[in-house]
Amino acid sequence: MITRRLPVKLNREEVRLKGKRLAILEAEIESLEGEKKAVVDDFKSKIEGRKAEIQSLSRQVNEEQEYRQVEVVERKDWDELTVDTVRTDTGDIIESRPMTTSERQRPIPFNQPRMADDFIGEVLDEVSDQINAGAIGSDVKATRKRA
């Protein structure tokens, strides 16, 4: 037997089934295109991240430096009436500005508050030294022994 590929008229059921298959295929294509877009967007994001890192590293290599958090301190320059911001790692002044009015007020140096017991102990030691050295009379010596 010999066969050829020739047109054949479809009946209603065949048309309905093929229409249903057509709708399914279109929905699958739409879904696949959505998945493709998500994957492309994900890869695009990854590529952009790598490009940003390359750009940053390139700048660091060309400038031979990078920005990091570095501890700094503020020091008052009383001669110039400025406040200098100084790097603690290198000692370099990175910024200098005029002192504000309140910063120009010098702190008043106060001694540490002394405790009463320390003060009394020092006085008693001093009196004892003077008694032992004979600088104070024997009447004080007798009083000290009673206490």
Image (cartoon, rainbow, N blue to C red):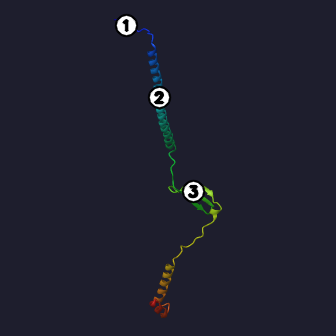
Q: What residue type is labelled 2?
A: Ser
Point out the tag, 3 or 1, that comes first from the N-terminus: 1
Q: Distance between the residues labelled 3 and 1?
A: 95 Å
Q: Which amino acid does label 1 sit on?
A: Thr
Residue lying farthest to the bottom in this orientation: 139
Residue beneath disc 1: 3
Point out the tag, 3 or 2, that comes first from the N-terminus: 2
Instruction: Please tell me whether mark 1 sits on a helix, a strand or a loop.
Output: loop
Foreground disc of the pair 3, 2: 2
Residue 90 is tagged as none
Find residue 79 and report its image quarter: bottom right
Q: In this view, does 95 lie to the left or right of 11?
A: right
Instruction: Please tell me whether mark 2 sits on a helix, a strand or a loop.
Output: helix
Q: Position of residue 104 (x, y in %)?
A: 63, 63
Foreground disc of the pair 3, 1: 1
Q: In this view, does 78 lie to the left or right of 30?
A: right
What residue sits 47% from the left and 37% below the top?
46
In front of the other: 108 or 86: 108
In front of the other: 37 or 4: 4
Locate the N terminus by quadrant.
Answer: top left
Residue beneath disc 3: 85
Residue beneath disc 2: 31
What residue sits 62% from the left and 56% below the top?
97
What residue sits 52% from the left and 44% below the top?
63
Q: Which amino acid does label 3 sit on?
A: Thr
Instruction: Please tell me whether mark 3 sits on a helix, a strand or a loop.
Output: strand
Check the image and report above or below for 104 versus 43.
below
Q: Position of residue 128 (x, y in %)?
A: 47, 86
Q: Where is residue 44 in the image (x, y as percent from the top left)?
A: 49, 34
Q: Where is residue 2 in the image (x, y as percent from the top left)?
A: 35, 5
Check the image and report above or below for 123 versus 140.
above
